[in-house]
Image (cartoon, rainbow, N blue to C red):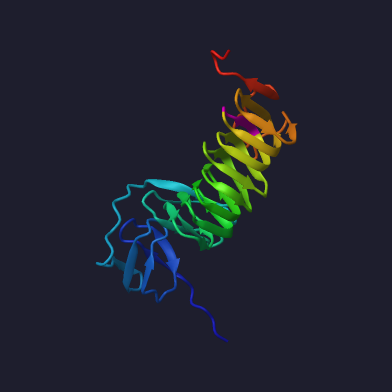
Amino acid sequence: MLTGHAKKPFQCPSCAFVQLEPPHLISTYCRACGDYYEVKRPGAATVSRFFPPAPILNGRRRDVFCHRCGTTHGVSEHARTTICGTCSAAIDLEDLNFLESASRPVDTRGSLLVGPGAIVSHSWLVCGSARIEGRVTGSLKCEGEVVLATTGSMVCQISAPSVVIEKGACVHVTLPVETDSFLVRGQFSGIVRCRGMVKVFRGGVLDADVKARSVVVEKGGRLDGNLCVDTAQASVADPQRSVQRAFSPLMVVEPSGAG
């Protein structure tokens, strides 16, 4: 019966991070700083001359949350990629720009840009922030703000703390949008589930099935569709965050100086 060899610790020569690898390791990428290094003998390592060493880190680190298993681990602030120590999921830490269509998973803590005419399709699209000028199909989960600056229809479920419909956009999303803040400067139709405030700015049009904690419509904005205001619901994205109570369930705010 074959038995596997126990893993041994190897130390990155750039940042001194120690990680477990097979004993006969030849080369690897550091899971902390992302540097590539070669192993000359068991337990010893040198940086390949083809890859520049990472800068001195002085202990500076950042936390990365894994959306697959729900755990958080620390990495160097200079890291470009990392691997979750619990579920071994690979996570990018850099910005990703899609100027052409692609069908692939995305898991980054940087920004995601989908350029005009591009379509990104997958059931696992996770990013730090997103700007959609093309189309997204599947499921998009964002840790920060999602800006929709596109036209047309998208079959996509969106979950983010903040969603902005940019001026000039005209978009229909067939699956629910879940957020804490939903700002409409262009035109949007679909299903909105907002744990905070929905605001339609002057010139904005919202034609949707809306459930929100508060709704604000500026003079010159328009809200059509079904509306349910639930002042008791709190944020799921960040339960520790205080929720503003300054807004009445439904308000129409007129710009100052209007006749």
Kindly report the secondary structure that dominates the magenta region of the rendered protein.
strand
**Which quadrant of the rendered structure holds the C terminus?**
top right
Residue 93 visible in the current orientation: no
> In terms of depth relative to the viewer, which is nearer, 128 or 216?
216
Q: Is residue 122 above or below residue 178?
A: below
Q: Residue at x 65, y 23 (%)?
A: 245
> In terms of depth relative to the viewer, which is nearer, 248 or 90?
248
Residue range in magenta is: 196-202
Q: Residue furthest bottom?
A: 1
Q: Is residue 210 above or below residue 219?
A: below
Q: Residue furthest front?
A: 259
Question: Was residue 200 drawn as part of the magenta stretch in this picture?
Answer: yes
> In terms of depth relative to the viewer, which is nearer, 112 or 190?
190
- The number of numbered badges drawn on the structure is 0
Q: Measured from the top left, where is residue 149 in percent x and y?
A: 51, 43
Question: Was residue 34 drawn as part of the magenta stretch in this picture?
Answer: no
Query: Residue 134 vs residue 233: left or right?
Result: left
Q: Residue at x 64, y 26 (%)?
A: 216
- Give the quarter of the image for residue 2: bottom right
Q: Measured from the top left, where is residue 150 in percent x and y?
A: 53, 46
Q: Is residue 224 above or below residue 138?
A: above
**Which quadrant of the rendered structure holds the N terminus?**
bottom right
Q: Measured from the top left, where is residue 146 in percent x and y?
A: 53, 43
Residue 203 visible in the current orientation: yes
Q: Is residue 194 above or below residue 35?
A: above
Query: Residue 31 vs residue 216: left or right?
Result: left
Q: Measured from the top left, where is residue 134 in percent x and y?
A: 51, 51
Q: Residue at x 60, y 30 (%)?
A: 200
